């Protein structure tokens, strides 16, 4: 019985060591996707600002966020990058998304949200700028 547990333990350790070795050999770069971590240089170090377009929805009888503008994008460094947004609720629940759009100036307008949420439900906006 002890011999069976010993053999099982050795086999489990060998599998663990193999998986750990494979995971340690993954190469992650700032332009690639994989398991691990890498430092990514930001194209806009001073941040961006956002503003919302709100409209009354007669069907739902509420004000809804129908558009988002991201402005203050560093044009020299971020042109050609993609930008996308997510409107989040109080528990970081994704309420709506838009994008990606290509940065070609200091601001990007998102006038078509995946599902316009009630303006009162929106707690914050997440902006992602990436290559």
Image (cartoon, rainbow, N blue to C red):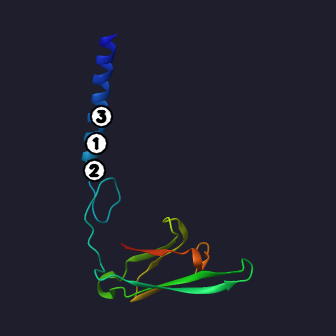
Task: Tell me if I can see residue 37 in this picture.
Answer: yes
Q: Residue 22 carries which label?
A: 1
- Of the pair 101 and 71, the residue shown nearer to us: 71
x%, y% of residue 42? Answer: 29, 75
Q: Mark 2 points at which residue?
A: 26
Q: Which mark is residue 114?
A: none
- Of the pair 33 and 13, the residue shown nearer to us: 13
User: Is disc 2 surrounded by few (<14), some (14 to 19) or many (20+) residues within 10 Å?
Assistant: few
Q: Earlier in the sequence, mark 2 or mark 3?
A: 3
User: Is disc 1 surrounded by few (<14), some (14 to 19) or many (20+) residues within 10 Å?
Assistant: few
Callout 2 touching callout 3 (CB < 8 Å): no
- Of the pair 11 and 56, the residue shown nearer to us: 56
Q: Residue 16 carries which label?
A: 3
Callout 2 touching callout 1 (CB < 8 Å): yes
Q: In which quarter of the image is residue 76?
A: bottom left
Q: Distance between the residues labelled 2 and 1?
A: 7 Å
Task: Tell me if I can see residue 110 in this picture.
Answer: no
Q: In this view, does 53 lie above or below 83?
A: below
Q: In which quarter of the image is residue 18?
A: top left
Q: How far apart are marks 3 and 1 (CA)?
A: 10 Å
Q: How far apart are marks 2 and 3 (CA)?
A: 16 Å
Secondary structure beneath disc 1?
helix
* Image point (48%, 66%), residue name: 92
* Image point (67%, 85%), residue name: 56
Secondary structure beneath disc 3?
helix
């Amino acid at each position: 019985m002890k011999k069976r547990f010993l053999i099982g333990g050795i086999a489990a350790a060998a599998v663990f060591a193999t998986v750990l070795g494979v995971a340690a050999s993954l190469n992650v770069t700032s332009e690639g996707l994989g398991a691990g971590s890498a430092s990514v240089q930001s194209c806009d170090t001073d941040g961006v600002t956002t503003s919302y377009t709100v409209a009354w929805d007669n069907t739902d009888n509420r004000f809804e966020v129908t558009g988002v503008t991201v402005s203050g994008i560093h044009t020299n460094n971020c042109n050609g990058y993609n930008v996308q947004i997510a409107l989040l609720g109080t528990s970081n629940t994704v309420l709506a998304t838009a994008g990606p759009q290509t940065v070609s100036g200091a601001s990007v307008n998102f006038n078509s949200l995946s599902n316009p949420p009630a303006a009162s439900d929106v707690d914050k906006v997440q902006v992602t700028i990436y290559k």
